[in-house]
Image (spheres, rainbow, N blue to C red):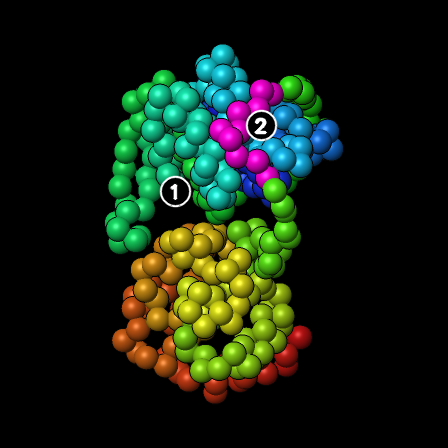
Amino acid sequence: MTVNNIWVITDDQNAVGELCDGGRQLGKQVSVILFSDQNRAQEAISSGADQVYLFGQAGESVMIEDYSKSIAELLRAEKADLVLVYSSIRGKLIAGRIATQLGISVLSNVSELTVDDGSIIVKHMVYGGAAIRTEKALTDTVVVTVGSGVFEAMPKDAARQGKVNEINPNVDNAGIRILETRPKQGELVNLSAAKRVVGVGRGFAAQEDLKMAEEFTALVGAEMACSRPIAEGEKWMSKERYVGVSGVVLKPDIYIALGISGQIQHMVGVNHAKTLVAINKDKNAPIFKQVDIGLVGDLYKVLPKIAEKIKAQN
């Protein structure tokens, strides 16, 4: 069963395809709010949008969340049933402001959405990923924040037709304006779109040892990811590559965990992988209870031998 009117809001163009795919699964019509230009609007239509509401790019002293009041008025006028907001820092702020304007709550960090008898049912992780709570939304309009990996983007269809509406929004900046903008330090990586991912954990004793994992990752044509301690504790890799309950959620064809113990906070980020493989020297590591293929062994000895076998077959 579906609902009638799905809306997508994102400040990240890479998330448009995923959210549109989710919208098409759940509703009859998908409308997208973008803060960009006509080219991006056409990309959204090819990704599954029926309509795009183009708010344009904010001025130098204006933040896109300053459009929240205008967005809420639009959602109210169009009688939106479900609003999917990409779970970026700005997206969460916009979701909160919109919900306040509409007099409703936000359902955060949603991991699954369904429609049952016209009602929207959501599941999201609680207690740091140790449990999943199911909730039924009771309001006419439901606002949820959705991260990467919850939906899978379908291939773009350049022949799709849709309508682009240019909006001239009112700005409500609540006395806050941008004084300076600096480029974000970090990597541009879209792990949620990767079909093969190799994850590294504390089983690596030193940062220079990650070179071995990088070479293996390249050999199998994968993207490289990591557990939280590698990114936030040791700072050996960027936060963009951290997988877990507060990081990236993956849906690859295969996930290979190297030296990762398998704490629940990490596993919730990979439990949608079609195949899970783990190499760990600790036979009692929690990860072995969840994988499809597990190898107990010293990754410093095992990984080079696996790499040799792969090279010999190529």
- The residue at 32%/79% (across/down) is 282
Residue 114 lies left or right of residue 199; in this view the side is left
Q: Quadrant of residue 98?
A: top left
Which sits in the foreground, 248 or 57? 57
- Tell me residue 60's x, y (percent): 67, 36
Mark 1 crowdedness (10 Å alpha carbons): few <14, some 14-19, many ≥20: many
The local secondary structure at tag 2 comes to strand
Residue 33: numbered disc: 2
Q: Locate the N terminus and report the quarter of the image it occupies.
A: top left
> In which quadrant of the rendered image does the C terminus lie?
bottom right
Is residue 13 something that shows in the picture? yes
User: How far from the left and from the top, in percent, is residue 150?
Assistant: 45, 43
Label 2 sits on what residue type?
A: Ile
Q: Which residues are magenta?
A: 169-178
Relative to 29, residue 176 above or below: below
**Residue 227 point in image, percent of width and height:** 43, 65
- Residue 97, compared with residue 223, is above or below; it is above
| SS assignment for the magenta stretch, majority | loop
According to the picture, the residue beneath numbered tag 1 turns out to be 109
